[in-house]
């Protein structure tokens, strides 16, 4: 199931459990996949963001778009093509068709 919320970082919870109110600030080190906390006494502590390396996290909108961009692009292209063809057909039909045929089309929905 796709969630619309930002993923919660496990490292935040670990650091809060370790140090509580003694944390001055926290930052995310994305290159090492860790959260780093600056403590009141000036020392640093860090915690990993994953509970286990093989854990499959729930899908987010960003992860679905990253994995399925080719399929979504193809469907968007097909939808745009169909919309363009239908618009062109309506324009051609409206400008070149016999008025009796247009009246028949509009009266058809009444039945």
Image (cartoon, rainbow, N blue to C red):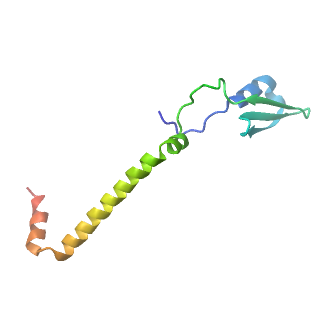
88 or 111, nearer to the observer:
88
**Depicted 111 relative to depicted 89: above or below:** above
8 or 51, nearer to the observer:
51
**Depicted 108 relative to depicted 33: above or below:** below
* Residue 54 located left or right of residue 30: left
Residue in the image at 68% along x and 29% along y? 10
Quadrant position of residue 50: top right
Q: Residue furthest right?
A: 41
User: Picture coordinates of residue 95 (x, y %)?
Assistant: 20, 76
User: Picture coordinates of residue 20 (x, y %)?
Assistant: 79, 26
Quadrant position of residue 6: top right
* Residue 15 located left or right of residue 100: right
**Depicted 49 relative to depicted 62: above or below:** above
User: Picture coordinates of residue 31 (x, y %)?
Assistant: 73, 39
**Depicted 25 relative to depicted 51: above or below:** below
Residue in the image at 88% along x and 33% along y? 40
* Residue 40 located left or right of residue 18: right
Residue in the image at 79% along x and 35% along y? 36
How many marks can you see?
0
Q: Quadrant of the C terminus?
A: bottom left
User: Picture coordinates of residue 104 (x, y %)?
Assistant: 9, 66
Residue in the image at 52% along x and 35% along y? 59
1 or 24, nearer to the observer:
1
């Amino acid at each position: 199931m796709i969630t619309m919320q930002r993923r919660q970082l496990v490292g935040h919870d670990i650091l809060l459990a370790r140090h509580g109110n003694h944390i001055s600030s926290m930052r995310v080190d994305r290159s090492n996949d860790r959260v780093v906390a600056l403590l009141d006494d000036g020392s640093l502590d860090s915690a990993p963001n994953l509970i286990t390396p093989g854990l499959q996290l729930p899908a987010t909108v960003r992860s679905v778009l990253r994995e399925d961009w080719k399929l979504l692009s193809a469907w968007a292209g097909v939808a745009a093509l169909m919309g363009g063809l239908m618009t062109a057909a309506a324009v051609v039909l409206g400008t070149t068709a016999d008025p009796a045929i247009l009246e028949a089309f509009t009266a058809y929905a009444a039945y």
